[in-house]
Amino acid sequence: MNLKQKLQLCVVGNLLTLTIVVVSVIIFNSHSQYFSWGPNENLVVISVKIDDWTKYGFLLGLITIVNAVQVMSEEMGMPVLGFSIYNPDKKHITDFTKCELQAYANIMFLIGAIRKVFMVIVSITQIDIALYSIVIKELTSIITIRFLLNEKTFGDEILEKPLIEIAIQR
């Protein structure tokens, strides 16, 4: 099985599992408050009652900012830390001092862990907020991945460019 087939199998498996979970939730739904949409009298997020569209809009704006920054830092910053710290083949680090790398890693991990606690609390309050959070992360991920992929070449792209252009890019 080649790499593309493995990825396709993983996508199909994940989609099938997601479908089973969603159908099960719909079938066994006990009409809980979690399945409400929009602001309402019963929506309380971290001790704040979200009962009007202004508060709800502010909540969604805050979720947008937090999730966009999270995705960008995880997709751009965490690989730098991961490949610098955890790559067993990289024994000599030139971009950071030991103390800098230690500080950056521990600060990123601490901030991520604290943010995760709050975002879990926010996401479990109501299904629309959880789904909105996912959509924002995915939209930011599309932009971030495109940015990272634009820095790479694929297949025969490098053969199609004149050698002088390749030399200038490097």
Image (tube, helix red, strand yellow):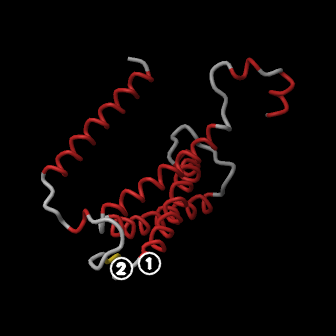
Q: CA distance from mark 2 to mark 1?
A: 7 Å
Which residue is the site of mark 1?
55
The answer to which image quadrant residue 129 occupies is bottom left
Residue at 46% x, 63% y: name it: 112
Q: What's the mark number on residue 103?
A: none
Horizontal side of residue 148 vs 31, given as left or right: right
Horizontal side of residue 116 vs 23, given as left or right: right
Image x and y of residue 36, in percent = 27, 66
Which residue is the site of mark 2?
51
Badge 1 marks a residue whose secondary structure is: helix
Quarter placement of the C terminus: top right
Horizontal side of residue 54 vs 18, given as left or right: right
Q: Residues within 10 Å of mark 2 (few under 14, many from 20)?
A: some
Quarter placement of the N terminus: top left
Residue at 54% x, 52% y: name it: 140
Image x and y of residue 33, in percent = 22, 68
